[in-house]
Amino acid sequence: MRVLLTTWGSRGDVEPLAGLAVGLRELGAQVRVCAPPDEEFAALLARVGVPLVPLGPLVRSVVVGTKPPTAKDAFRLAPELVAARFEALTAAAKGCDALLATGLMPAGARDVAEKLGIRYVFACFQIFGLPSRHFRPGARPGKQSPPEETDLKVLWEQDAQRVNALYGQALNSHRAAIGLPPVDSVRDYVFTDQPWLAADATLCPSQGMTDLDVVQTGAWILPDDRPFPQELEAFLDAGAPPVYVGFGSMAAHAPKDIARVAIEVSRAHDRRVLLARGWAGLAPIDDGEDCFVVGEVNQQALFRRVAAVVHHGGAGTTTTAARAGTPQVVVPLIADQPYWAARVATLGIGAAHDGPTPTFDSLSAALRAALTPATRARARAVADAIQTDGAAVAAKLLCDAVGQERPSVSA
């Protein structure tokens, strides 16, 4: 069995596919990943021996800048990605039995699978982007009274129109070029009636949240047994557990002066600071010995050694901190991050910062709440409920689905 996995997005979109690839290989499948050609993604996949097929522009070239991408940028990127998928996936998926797509609206992936006559699966890492009877498109859960069902229907229809405006013309043009009829709703065609949800059911419950027939596998976790650099190990051993502060690939979106605010707040709570450089290039504000900066590191092991994790609320970081049983402070910036912040607060495993721009007082209050014994106890209790075999579950589902579709061979 041969499988092509594809995504375009940040590390949080790429690493789960590496985890799934490992699960598929353990079942005997041959796997390739078609993803952005950023150097760190290539290194991540090389670490587990999975070939990377380049797809589209570097993610860093799009998100690392002084200002967040604009609507104009989105309308330029969308058709570029559609064209890249038709070109790259058509070549990479030849001889494959299945194509699984995730990440930023993978318009073009199902079309290639349709043309090649192979199994297609759409997967997402949170429930928030799927049409729902419970929340508005792009709205922050819990911040407003629930709209009427008729209002929701209109809003989600408008969301479909927005996706069509971004991708529709380019998608149908490429479909016509390979002899396929046009699609009316790009979003619905990409999602299918049975999307897979690669998220833990405790952190991200899906029951009754959407009319789609969601298949929830659990999060696709890539095991990490890398040791710490000696300098990091020495810092951790030199005192009480520090507060971890990191915003991943949130470069243009990272709060202004977040490093300064976080360091000052941590010091006010008599805590040392572990600052993750990330794509935003977070750096110390002085040469104090109570602050240490890390780059790419084993977060699964690191989060078990810290007092709290202050982060942006990506699906992967939230899940990793939850598995570690470590309290979280989520400062949500964009997209699904407010959803994860709300889930952390609802579960009692940390605090959700109100808004994307922390002040000393607001972040101090959130960290104080996260550092209470009750929050730590709750975080440890929830950690025991987190499912860890999601990649294996998804790999078996995919292998079984392909096996059922293959025609039987008589002797």
Image: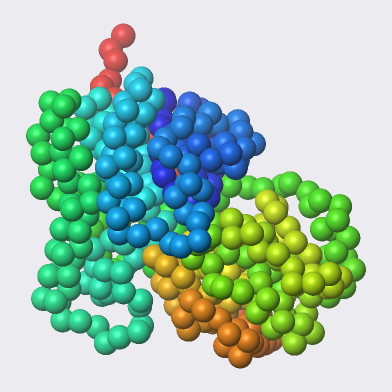
**In the image, what residue occupies the spot 83% across and 65% down?**
236
Going by the image, does 225 lie left or right of 33? Answer: right
Judge whether 216 appears above or below 158 on screen: above
Going by the image, does 342 lie left or right of 79? Answer: right
Quarter of the C terminus within the rendering: top left
Going by the image, does 357 lie left or right of 191? Answer: right
Residue 307, percent from left and from top: 72, 75
Q: Which residue is nearer to you in this view: 386 or 37? A: 37
Residue 385, percent from left and from top: 55, 67
**In the image, what residue occupies the spot 46% across and 62% down?**
67
**In the image, what residue occupies the spot 36% across and 39% down?**
100
**In the image, what residue occupies the spot 25% across and 73% down?**
136
What colour scheme has been applied to the protein in the rendered image?
Answer: rainbow
In this orientation, does residue 180 appear? Answer: no
Quarter of the N terminus within the rendering: top left
Q: Which residue is nearer to you in this view: 57 or 196? A: 57
In this orientation, does residue 161 appear? Answer: yes
Judge whether 150 appears above or below 197 on screen: below
Residue 390, percent from left and from top: 49, 51
Judge whether 161 appears above or below 51 on screen: below
Residue 114, percent from left and from top: 22, 31
Judge whether 104 appears above or below 377 on screen: above
Residue most extreme to the top: 411
Q: Which residue is nearer to you in this view: 53 or 351? A: 53
Q: Quadrant of residue 329?
A: bottom right
Q: How many marks?
A: 0
